[in-house]
């Protein structure tokens, strides 16, 4: 029992550290003067290599049979992951880190909305209420009532953030279809596929010869790639086997809370009163939607 408690405590510490790291990524993106597609490409490449080394050092091997069985879903989810990163990094450029993060955290709500169609799951009253509350919260976060849509950059940032949420919701839904493969194998393959998809996109969409690689930018890019991807993913997946799904869902909200706090403290990005109320509604609704419902006896 004591050993079990120690493993659970260690797993919780790993998960908290992973969430703290994830919550700072928006800050680092601000100091990388590169297109979002290039950041996503490098992040995927370095993150994949880091996890490959990590798995090898653990004495584990990729299950290629499992990869083959899930090939189509892995390809789709890897492509979705890459474009999800591009849109999220673009959102950080056009709007505040807090707003971009809150838009991104609409992904669970999107999953709830499409679940009856794609997963044949019924919508409970609780989930419907969570969707309504989250949508109201997102409306308040966008601050449309206060400033309208005259601020084109802010509006674009919100759209990019919601676009990222759509792609991440796609990743969540596709991951539900992946069977008989470890979390590490799945993530390594998805990162690798995202690189394959992003490489031609980046070469065609961006003028690589005119990209500015400053010492600070390169250092921040390596932090995002190694720390926010390789290390954070290793901590995140390493904690899962010793924690309940409900605990993981609860702890995952450390990420947006940290992002919102750092947005205000480090970047001095202010949020209106309505925006703060909206943030509480969005995070509260998404959290409640992920908690298990009590089964009536």
Image: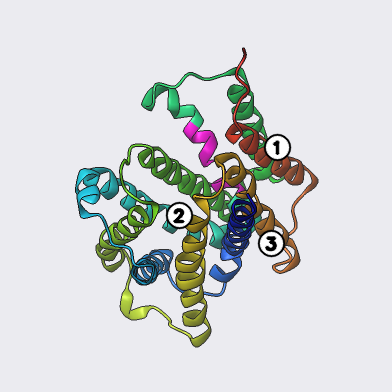
- On the question of residue 151 being in view, the answer is no
Q: Name the dominant secondary structure of the magenta segment.
A: helix
Instruction: State the scheme by which the image is colored.
Output: rainbow
Question: What span is in magenta?
Answer: 102-111
Which quarter of the picture shows residue 249?
top right
Residue 210, x across and y down, in percent: 36, 79
Q: What residue lies at 47% left-to-right and 61% top-to-bottom?
A: 233
Q: What residue lies at 71% left-to-right and 69% top-to-bottom?
A: 266
Q: Residues within 10 Å of mark 3 (few under 14, many from 20)?
A: many
Reading the image, the residue beneath label 1 is 281
Residue extending furthest front?
1
Inter-mark Cα distance, 1 to 2: 23 Å
Horizontal side, residue 147 vs residue 206: left or right: right
Residue 59, x across and y down, in percent: 34, 67
Return the residue nearer the eye: 11 or 109. 11
Q: Between disc 1 and disc 3, whose residue precedes?
A: 3
Per the image, label 2 sits on a secondary structure element best described as: helix
Reading the image, the residue beneath label 3 is 263
Per the image, label 3 sits on a secondary structure element best described as: helix
Q: Considering only vertical position in the picture, is 196 above or below 140?
A: below
Horizontal side, residue 189 vs residue 289: left or right: left
Q: Between disc 3 and disc 2, whose residue precedes?
A: 2
Residue 137, x across and y down, in percent: 67, 37
Q: Considering only vertical position in the picture, is 220 above or below 230?
A: below
Inter-mark Cα distance, 1 to 3: 18 Å
């Amino acid at each position: 029992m004591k050993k079990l408690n120690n493993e659970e405590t260690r797993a919780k510490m790993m998960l908290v550290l992973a969430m703290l790291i994830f919550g700072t990524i928006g800050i680092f993106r601000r100091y990388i003067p590169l297109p979002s597609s290039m950041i996503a490409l490098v992040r995927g490449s370095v993150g994949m290599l880091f996890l490959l080394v990590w798995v090898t050092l653990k004495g584990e091997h990729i299950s290629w049979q499992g990869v083959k069985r899930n090939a189509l879903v892995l390809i789709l989810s890897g492509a979705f992951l890459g474009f999800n990163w591009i849109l999220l990094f673009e959102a950080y450029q056009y709007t505040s880190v807090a707003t971009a993060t809150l838009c991104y955290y609409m992904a669970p709500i999107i999953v709830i909305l499409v679940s009856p169609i794609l997963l044949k799951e019924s919508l409970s009253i609780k989930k419907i209420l969570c969707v309504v509350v989250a949508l109201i919260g997102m409306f308040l976060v966008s601050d449309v009532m206060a400033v309208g849509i005259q601020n084109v950059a802010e509006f674009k940032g919100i759209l990019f953030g919601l676009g990222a949420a759509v792609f991440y919701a796609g990743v969540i839904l596709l991951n539900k279809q992946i069977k008989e493969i470890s979390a590490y194998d799945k993530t390594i393959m998805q990162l690798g596929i995202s690189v394959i998809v992003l490489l031609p996109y980046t070469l065609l969409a961006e003028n690589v010869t005119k990209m500015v690689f400053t010492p600070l930018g390169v250092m921040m890019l390596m932090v995002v790639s190694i720390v926010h991807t390789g290390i954070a993913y290793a901590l995140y997946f390493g904690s899962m086997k010793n924690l309940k799904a409900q605990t993981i869902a609860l702890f995952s909200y450390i990420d947006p809370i940290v992002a919102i706090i750092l947005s205000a403290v480090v970047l001095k990005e202010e949020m209106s009163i309505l925006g703060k109320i909206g943030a509480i509604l969005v995070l509260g609704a998404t959290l409640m939607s992920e908690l298990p419902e009590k089964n009536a006896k």
